[in-house]
Image: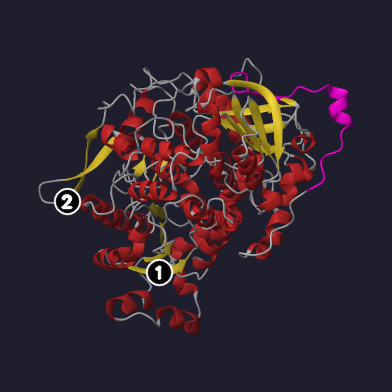
Amino acid sequence: MQTPLNPAVAEVTDRLTERSRADRTAYLERISRSASELSLRPARTDLGCSNLAHAVAPCTGSDRDLLAADEGVSVGIVTAYNDMLSAHAPFEHYPSQIKAVARSAGAVARVAGGVPAMCDGITQGRAGMELSLFSRDVITMSTAIALSHDVFDAALLLGVCDKIVPGLVAGALSFGHLPAALVPAGPMASGRSNAEKAETRKAYAAGEAGRDELLASEVASYHSPGTCTFYGTANSNQMLMDVMGLHLPGAAFIHPDDPLRDALTAATTRRVVEIAASERPYGTGQIVDEKSVVNGVVTLLATGGSTNHTMHLISMAAAAGIDLRWEDFDQLSAAVPLVARIYPNGPDDVNHFHAAGGTPFLVHTLLDAGLLHEDVLTLAGPGLRRYSRRPTLDAHGELEFATAVTESSNHDVLRPAHEPFAQDGGLRVLQGTLGHAVIKTSAIAGKDRVVEAPARVFTDQVAFLRAFSRRELDRDVVVVIREQGPSANGMPELHGLTPSLGVLQKRGHAVALVTDGRMSGASGSIPAAIHVTPESVHGGPIAKIHDGDVVRVDSLSGRLDVLVDEDEFAAREPAARVTEDGVGTGRELFASMRAAVGRADEGAHVFGASDLRSSRHAVPLTVSEESR
């Protein structure tokens, strides 16, 4: 017997569906027209003879014969491979494997194109980080270019990390009539524990450890091909792709060198070929619907995932004609329990999470609690319950999906929904006199859920670190770092702040961060009101804060306020901009994107940004206490 759907989940889904009705209908009509054209014959057969000859020219043997014929599935591979990113290095050999599997299934697979994949770990605190968020939209457009040749009947998207997966998904949704799947590579094995790594970083920030000790710690933590093992945006991507049905079940966290990884890649290839060749093919645009999007938000909240997805999920949803908003996250957060503690929310990493039961158990417990929609379409077929089954290899090395995972083997990292770590989700939306913001609460101690202290205002990380090194911040303080929003400088992640803020907290001070920049979730135990909207360069209230103003960050009641006389604060002029548009490290090439980008609470993307900015969230959120 199926558990009734949680009332908050039902209410948010109904509201989202009604709000999105016009745009979603138009989107579905568009992909339906494309699908109708494909149902008559493969896309490539509509090409002129010269066009088709160009498409077939690189092929030989059976691939050439199949592509020249009127039957047979053509699969486009869009790859984010490079061998600079540990998470993407394993993709080097995927195309050759996929091509062989496709050939055995009577299809042809080819690399349609590549997309950029930059590493936020390498660019943290560097000028290149100012390109990071915009790379998502570049990836979206690159995916569209790769699939634009009208020769593909299905697609495989090879990507793992932060902006890459959201960009691939949004690009694929422009071709939402095509069957498509995300193909992951999996995490590296656990190295030095994340907790030990964090302590070494704090020691270095406090001057108690040298560079050699810090480097040795970092190298022992990030040590081999595969995704970093902490629960940041990359692993949040993988979690969401599992539960939103864009992977095969349980595919997210299998190591790159595990034979099961190759088996899942092969099965994913066969599956998209099977869907494309079927009498009733379905595409990514049908999988990513309102219920699937709500399932993604619930999963993010239940696991304390990356705050970046308060933008990325909005952007992906918009590509499918779905109008997701922060108020939806906020209402769901009050109803969704926190059932996982993965570093930085706890001591264990994604490998421990996977060993405890992973996404199969997560799906099982959230479905049983009525917190996920079961009646969704997925890559594996109709119904989400099949995603509670763990993939394994049988005695002959063949892939099978075993019985459902109904128990967690480690309640320190993964718990059933009726015995959660916390009754509410790991994210909150804040609103108040400083605008809208997001805060990750899953790693914050109870005593730090409310911080009220004098502000110290900066416009970049360097100035903050200098003040910290001069011990100017050894007190209760709300650190305000502005001019870090999408329009200012591309909204870089500010992970470099965390060790120093952690040192202040360890010294016994009440500490919080308020910024229009990003933190991903790496804020850890520091209360961080991030993505503050409107941002400072648009005259947002954050631009009016002065040193010494008392700021209150209250993640219990969902408030973000400056405690200054209302008339006095209203009369203040926003501070003049200190930083300039970036030049160097390629930043000058992205000036048009800084000028066009939308607000953080609208997904911070450049597609239709001028329309988005004009009205949609010009008023404060109106989620009532009753609805929470």
- Residue 79, can we see it? yes
To which quarter of the image does residue 237 belong? top left
Q: Residue 189 vs residue 200: left or right?
A: left
Looking at this view, is 188 or 138 the one in front?
Answer: 188
Q: Which residue is drawn at 66% across and 54% down?
A: 606
For the residues labelled 2 and 1, the Cα–Cα distance comes to 26 Å
Is 373 covered by the magenta stretch? no
Find residue 279 and report its horizontal and vertical position in percent. Answer: 37, 55
The amino acid type found where label 1 is placed reads Val
| Total marks in image | 2
What residue did someone put label 2 on? Answer: 398
Query: For residue 433, which quarter of the picture?
Result: top right
Q: In which quarter of the image is the C terminus?
A: top right
Q: Estimate how packed mark 2 is, as few (under 14), some (14 to 19) or many (20 or more) residues with alpha carbons within 10 Å.
A: few
Q: What residue is shown at x 40% (from left), y 35% (from top)? A: 343
Q: Are marks 2 and 1 in contact (CB under 8 Å)?
A: no
Q: Give the range drawn in magenta.
A: 551-577
- Hey, what amino acid is under mark 2? Glu
**Residue 111's mark?**
1
For mark 2, give the secondary structure.
loop
Residue 327 falls in which quadrant of the image?
top right
Position of residue 379 relative to residue 354, above or below, is below
